[in-house]
Image (cartoon, grey):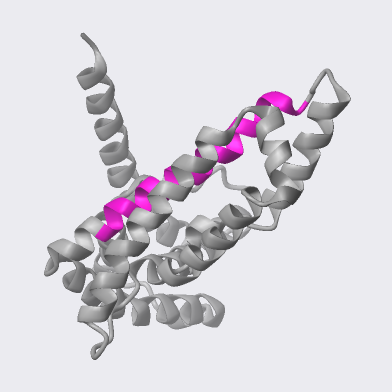
């Protein structure tokens, strides 16, 4: 079997516009070949579904670029996403708690947080509602003692503050734009990324078991774009590390 592999790419690290360009580049590169998309109807279905989403996603990006307020909303959303990650991480030191009190507190809070898995991937409105629920429960008598026992109040407070800051600005924007449709880039990107992953994994799997070059040629096209944007992410991270050095 062929050893050709799908080049790893941290898609979540791509900016919204970069992610859109990753998809567009695949279609552009594919269009320059003589490969017949109809050879594999399953691939064609995945290809067409992905292609239909691109104009909607790009239109949503244009709406965001046109609004400084929307840009600020995206930044505030990123802050609260970071705060929920930090809250989850604050529990990790207690996975092997030495005392029963801490073990019980850890288990109680871990179970609670499991109900809000992937909340950061929800649409803006849904994430706000779910975080309001989570924060309210963490501050309730049922869970507040566990929070105090583990000394993670500041992480709960940080999440509460960032969620309030996001919701205040978002509510203002929502009021101003209540008469027009505002595309949710976050939700669109989530769907687009899922479909892209399905397609690329399918092609990688077929390329590894099929003897003909059809799937290998498609995988090469996919990898060309992934390699470029993988280097973009790597360069950005290296630049960030250099900036931190004294």
Residue in view at x 26 percent, y 40 percent: 232
Looking at the image, which residue sits at the far top?
246
Looking at the image, which residue sits at the far right?
100
Which is nearer the eye, 232 or 199? 232
Q: Is residue 18 visible?
A: yes
Residue 185 location (% of width, % of height) = 33, 69
Which is nearer the eye, 232 or 149? 149
Quadrant location of the C terminus?
top left
User: Is 106 inside the magenta-drawn segment?
Assistant: no
Looking at the image, which residue sits at the far bottom?
179
Which is nearer the eye, 245 or 152? 152
Residue 37 location (% of width, % of height) = 42, 78
Residue 36 location (% of width, % of height) = 39, 78
Q: Residue 65: name its quadrant.
A: bottom left
* As drawn, 32 above or below 19: below
Residue in view at x 72 percent, y 51 percent: 112
Which is nearer the eye, 216 or 10? 10
Q: Which residues are magenta?
A: 73-95
* As drawn, 22 above or below 180: above
* As drawn, 232 above or below 74: above
The count of marks equals: 0
Residue 111 location (% of width, % of height) = 76, 48
User: Is 77 inside the magenta-drawn segment?
Assistant: yes
Q: Image check: 197 left or right of 70? A: right
Main SS category, magenta section: helix
Q: Is residue 30 visible?
A: no
Residue in view at x 56 percent, y 64 percent: 130
């Amino acid at each position: 079997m062929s050893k050709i592999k799908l080049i790893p790419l941290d898609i979540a690290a791509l900016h919204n516009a970069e992610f859109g360009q990753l998809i567009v580049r695949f279609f552009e590169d594919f269009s320059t070949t003589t490969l017949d998309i109809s050879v594999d109807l399953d691939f064609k279905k995945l290809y067409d579904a992905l292609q239909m989403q691109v104009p909607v996603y790009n239109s949503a990006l244009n709406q965001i670029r046109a609004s400084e307020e929307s840009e600020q909303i995206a930044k505030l959303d990123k802050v609260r996403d970071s705060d929920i990650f930090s809250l989850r991480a604050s529990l990790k030191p207690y996975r092997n708690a030495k005392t029963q009190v801490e073990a019980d507190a850890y288990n109680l809070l871990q179970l609670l947080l499991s109900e809000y898995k992937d909340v950061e991937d929800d649409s803006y409105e849904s994430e706000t509602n779910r975080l309001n629920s989570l924060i309210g429960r963490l501050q309730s008598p049922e869970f507040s003692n566990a929070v105090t026992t583990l000394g993670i109040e500041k992480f709960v407070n940080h999440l509460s503050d960032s969620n309030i800051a996001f919701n205040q600005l978002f509510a203002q924007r929502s009021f101003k734009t209540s008469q027009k449709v505002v595309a949710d880039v976050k939700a669109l990107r989530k769907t687009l990324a899922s479909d892209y992953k399905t397609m690329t994994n399918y092609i990688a799997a077929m390329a590894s078991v099929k003897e003909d070059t059809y799937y290998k040629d498609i995988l090469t096209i996919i990898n060309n774009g992934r390699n470029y944007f993988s280097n973009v992410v790597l360069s950005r991270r290296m630049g960030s590390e250099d900036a931190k050095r004294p």
